Image (spheres, helix red, strand yellow):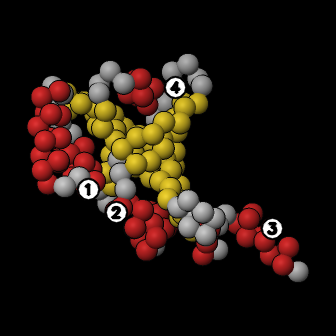
Amino acid sequence: MERQDIDAELSVTGARELLDSTSAAHLAYVGNDGAPRVIPVGFFWTGDEFVISTATTSPKVAALSTHPEVALAVDAGNTPDQARSLSIRGRASVEIVDGVVKEYVAAARRTMDADAAAEFEQNVRRMYDQMARIAITPTWVRYYDFGAGRMPRFLQELAAQNQS
């Protein structure tokens, strides 16, 4: 997928809403034992990459250094009409940084009021001497809005066949 196609998909109103309204996602990757994993993660979209921050000792840090190909899903909606999803494939890079990853604090600020965010940041800065900054550069992106009929092509074709 070309970068302009990725940017176009991420600029769709519903996709932007998902990126701006939540910092929760599910990360899929291959562990060092070769088995797949899907785990909940917090993220921050910089406009170029999805940043996930974690402890340097997290198992995903070692695994992503060996197997950098990943998938990320950001979902919302509790009914079929409300179901929306942003599906991302990409390549992860891992960098160990001193102190706290700036995007980690920025993501927390989006979900907390000012006082709670300040307390969170103070506690995090006491806890971490170093953090792992996992940056995922998207290589493929799709935004689905099932209630609006924006769904995978195979489902669109199936729905069209059944309307006849």
Is the C-beta separation of discs 4 and 2 under 8 Å?
no
- Return the residue nearer the eye: 63 or 104: 104
Q: Which mark is residue 140?
A: none
Instruction: Give the SS element for disc 1.
Output: helix
Name the residue rendered at 44%, 47% in the picture.
25
Under mark 2, the amino acid is Asp
Residue highlighted by disc 2: 20
Is the C-beta separation of discs 1 and 4 under 8 Å?
no
Residue 35 left/right relative to 44: right
- C-alpha span from label 1 to label 4: 30 Å
The tag earlier along the polypeptide, 4 or 3, is: 4
- Image quadrant holding the C terminus, namely bottom right
- C-alpha span from label 4 to label 3: 35 Å
Is the C-beta separation of discs 2 and 1 under 8 Å?
yes
The tag earlier along the polypeptide, 2 or 3, is: 2
Outermost residue on the right side: it is 164
- Residue 4 in view (yes/no): no
- Residue 148 in view (yes/no): yes
Under mark 4, the amino acid is Gly
Residue highlighted by disc 3: 158
Q: Which mark is residue 31?
A: 4
